[in-house]
Amino acid sequence: MLNSEQLEDLTERFKTVQTGGGGHLEKHDVQEALKVLGIDLPGYEMRDLLTRFGNASEVSIADFTTLFNELEQRKSAEVKRWKQRIGSVQGTYQIPSEKQENTVHTIRVEEEVAFSNWINSNLGSDLDLRRLLPVNPSGGELYTKVGDGLILCKLINLSTPDTIDERAINKKNLNTYTKLENLTLALMSAQAIGVNIVNIGATDLSVGTPHLVLGLLWQIIRIGLFNQIDLHHVPGLFRLMQEGETLDDLRKLSPEEILMRWVNYHLDKVCVQRRLTNFTGDIMDSEIYTHLLHQIAPKGSGVSLHPLSVQGNVNRAGSMLNEADKLECREFVTPNDVAGGNYKLNLAFVANLFNKHPALPDPGADELPAEDIIEETREEKTYRNWMNSMGVNPYVNWLYSDLNNGVIIFQLYDIIKPGIVSWKRVVQKFHKLRGMMDQIQNCNYAVELGKQLRFSLVGIQGKDIYDGNPTLTLALIWQLMRAYTLTVLAACTQSGDSLPADKDIVAWVNNKLASKGKTSSIRSFQDSSISDARVVLDLVDAIKPNVIDHSLVKSGSSQNDKMENAKYAITCGRKIGAKIYALPEDIVEVKPKMVLTVFACLMARDYMPDMQEAAPESTPVVYDSASNGHYDAYGNDETHDPASFDLHNLVLLHNLSSVHKESPFMGWHQPSLTLNKFKRKRSDRGQLFNKRKWVRREFESVLYLCDEQKSGLNQTQTEIPSKIVSDIREAKPAEAVKKRGERSNTNSKNKRPQKVEDSRYIAQ
């Protein structure tokens, strides 16, 4: 039987289907109805299936349900056979870099298999993904199926629950723009949980750039696997302390080090002399894994030591994984991955084992007082995620131990103000005899640099950072994050070295809201009216209309309403490209520091270029200035403001040509280049970005699409109406480019471009 949600989807799409499951489907609609329910069949197969209904023009819902159930069972059987085949998959292949000449990227097939399998096993029951799952790693399917952002958003919420408010995800009737919105949301949300997304853009994901997709997936999965390897989630970790150690010593360990201790703890329990020191060579014979599985397995699970009697590393690994399957922990590795010592996948395998079967009894009150188990605060987690998203090395796991040598802090200074750090003064390799002195010296220099940036560091010395003093360490980190946020904002607003003051951001917020007819406003970042998040929602709507679904906004009269609004506001802010690290609780509780970052990030986003800014809710648009008509993607004539012709036209042209892989101009396009620069009336108007060449190539690219209509439409799924094609062909871009060039050369001294008389070609 079809469930209620599936019936609802069908009734929304097909008028002949009744809410209670009655009615019928037109025969020619059956294939589309199956697609709605997640089953996409090729035309030749569909024609064979439809012969069972004879010459009837209608198919009853009961008959359709029978067909759907048969196809679902066949799909499940295929998934099972596919899982049995993946055990022997291995190898690598190389792809050339699209951004750097003479550079190739190596893609590991086993990673494609492992990540696809993880997605299938953890997200397979999600109804929103039924048309996308299961992912078959062969044939590049993984890269095409992440292209609409849905899988990535769901995977982020799996790794760090409630990061994304699913109400803001575009789920149905997706087009180029709504897919890019989902991908932007996924990237900004991934960054907020500590993923380094440098050099990864939404367009890279939409075209399925393999090494970038795999890199992003691994970071998201890794965070999810390591999130709960701490004392708060597993108090029994205290049993891994060695003689003379304290809980602080345990907190200083990385997740990898904790996992190795955990394995060795269980090996010691069964008197096995071998010890795990790495996730490569030590596990290749599967002996450590076999003993570990036998030790942590619950009674009655049937896990045995049989693999120890199997000859050959690959065969023994296969037998060991059969034992792991009894614990539902076979994910990530194949026998070849184990026998080959694949570090990344074996690390993930062990982390998954730990999360499901730690086998570490909780401490008694006499062993470990509850107050000694300190949970990472929201503030600490936000700062840590921000640092890791910046790509610092090594990875920050615990603020008060990982910053005590100053190296991470120097990397952050160099990001905030490149060149400020004199790396000759920084000690990066520490020796036992003078290691403490070198680390304190580094921290003293870090405080010195903070004073150069006018940080308020009264009473803070390098020794405080080295000792991990929570209050003073957080004071420095907050000022680093604030400086970074304001530096990004200053770069977007072209304000030079002067950083915006708090009052400037408040003034911008109120002016932006007023300019869009909003009645909300704020007096400061401590304004109690912020707590219901409605002002943040209004601001997002002012920056980019049609993103907020106002029917989802609560009144804010209760704490629950406020939290729901805050979750939705932060998610929508990220959806439009704002780099928001704050949490919903920060808005509800009106934490001034984090509230400042929210508004500053939204302000920066408003100044940033945006390829999708001109896109309406559903379909791309092209405006014809001659007829004053506004056309949607299907050629429907609507009323529209003539002044926005060029913005709409060129945005569409760029997006169409950028996603078309066969376009000879594909390699030239830069996603960060946008038409917002064209219409902005600020001091940066003189920066032309070589507009002449860009406009010419945009027109040439879309004409290429028009000439190659069939392949172009298959790639973009966007119709180009004949009227619009005609308008584009009549535009004569070369003449427009010539006019633009003459004006640019005439005004080269003051670098302020003048208006172009013919607005058919260049946006003002």
Image (tube, rainbow, N blue to C red):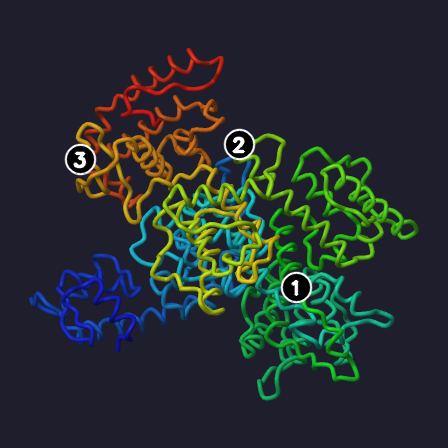
- Is the Cβ of the residue at disc 2 closer than 8 Å to that at disc 3? no
Between the C-alphas of marks 2 and 3, the distance is 38 Å
Reading the chain from its start, which is encountered first: label 1 or label 3?
1
Q: Looking at the picture, which amino acid does disc 2 mark?
A: Glu
Residue placed farthest to the bottom in the image?
300
Picture layout, residue 326 above or below residue 339: below
Q: Residue at x 17, y 40 (%)?
A: 637
- Is the Cβ of the residue at disc 1 closer than 8 Å to that at disc 3? no
Q: Position of residue 294 (x, y in %)?
A: 65, 80
Residue placed farthest to the top in the image?
746
Q: Looking at the picture, which amino acid does disc 1 mark?
A: Thr
Q: Position of residue 378 (x, y in %)?
A: 62, 62
Residue mark closest to the camera, 2 vs 1: 1
Query: Badge 3: few (under 14), some or many (20 or more) residues near its Cα, within 10 Å?
Result: few
Which one is nearer the viewer's eye here, 630 or 118? 630
Q: Looking at the picture, which amino acid does disc 3 mark?
A: Ser
Residue ID for mark 1: 377
Picture layout, residue 754 above or below residue 603: above
Query: Badge 2: few (under 14), some or many (20 or more) residues near its Cα, within 10 Å?
Result: few
Residue ID for mark 2: 101
Q: Which mark is drawn over residue 722? A: 3
Query: Badge 1: few (under 14), some or many (20 or more) residues near its Cα, within 10 Å?
Result: few
Instruction: Label 1: state its secondary structure.
Output: loop
Instruction: Label 3: state its secondary structure.
Output: helix
Q: Which mark is drawn over residue 1? A: none
Q: Looking at the figure, which quarter contains the N terminus?
A: bottom left
